[in-house]
Amino acid sequence: MRTINGYPITPQQPIPSGFGHDTTATEALGGRDLTGKTAIVTGGYSGIGLETVRVLAKAGATVVVPARTLEKARTSLAGIPRVELEELDLINPASVDAFARRFLDSGRQLDILVNSAGIMATPLARDAREYESQFATNHLGHFQLAARLWPALKQSGGARVVAVSSGAARLGGVDFDDPIFERREYDKWIAYAQSKSANALFAVELDKRGYASGVRAFSVHPGIIETDLTRHLSNDEIRAGRRNSNLKTPEQGAATSVWCAASAQLDGKGGVYCENVDIAKVVPADTPMGQPGVMTWAIDPVMAERLWQLSEDMTGINFET
């Protein structure tokens, strides 16, 4: 394995894992016992986030689920053992800080952080800072959350951070000249792609910075799953997605997140983009949507470092690792 300044570069290529498109989250876990582990799963009360919570909890982990809509979350999570419900709105920096402060005050270490929450293809909206909402929610909110939770992640001595990206990242990378659409015309899919490329780049840089503390990071394309994430899409867009995609169930869609969060197959690895319960291969920029693989702009280490600096500037947070 190639190293740079003592940091081992995990090859961006399949292991292969022996798993695939139809693998479920339970199968991906491989029977690993998570008793005594503590996990946080954003978006853990719907879609693949809910299935991620269900499998981690069943394996023995205590799972904290931060939610913007507490009543909806309480209903969805009913009957799942070892789940704690907390309030969090990722687009609100004060809410992120308050949630992290409550967790740190508990004195617990954090073994698994799965950044699964997100919004997709929304009409143009801005937060209180005038930042475009998809970039602010999907990337900056999770960047701030990981920064604030860093002491608990380091305390684990072997934590994993999973950034849920998307195959839509191949529609475009981060526009460093205009990340919040101040000058260019807003396109809901380009904005979504940018936020999902940012998720993947975040994992690249976090893994490098966290390696010395035993914190490893991965990004994940879960596949195409019909969940609440499609609520802003037209019926025509949803029908087109069904025609052009090999759909997964939520159990299959959560598999790669769970694999990255806990599988022994990834011990000693990190900083890679994963899909179909394996490390993805790098593909050319003209590869059609729906085909497996990751574009270079979502895993480029130079872009990852540049995004890190931009994120610190935009959030006002010096993410000390």
Image (cartoon, grey):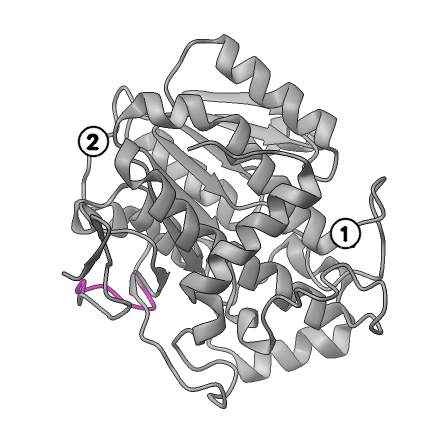
Label 1: which secondary element? helix
Mark 1 and mark 2: Cα distance apart in space: 38 Å
Q: Is residue 2 magenta?
A: no
Q: From the viewer's perspective, tell me whether residue 76 is left or right of residue 290.
A: right
Q: How many marks?
A: 2
Please rate how many residues cluster around mark 2, counting C-alpha atoms within 10 Å: few if below 14, some from 14 to 19, many from 20. Answer: some
Q: Residue furthest front?
A: 5
Q: Is residue 21 magenta?
A: yes
Q: Quadrant of residue 129?
A: top right
In the rendered structure, find residue 33 and report the number of the disc placed on it: 2
Magenta span covers which residues? 17-22
The residue positioned 35% from the left and 26% from the top of the image is: 154
Image: 195 above or below 263: below
- Looking at the rendered structure, the kind of residue marked 1 is Ser
Please rate how many residues cluster around mark 1, counting C-alpha atoms within 10 Å: few if below 14, some from 14 to 19, many from 20. Answer: many
- Looking at the rendered structure, the kind of residue marked 2 is Asp
Q: From the viewer's perspective, tell me whether residue 108 is left or right of residue 289.
A: left
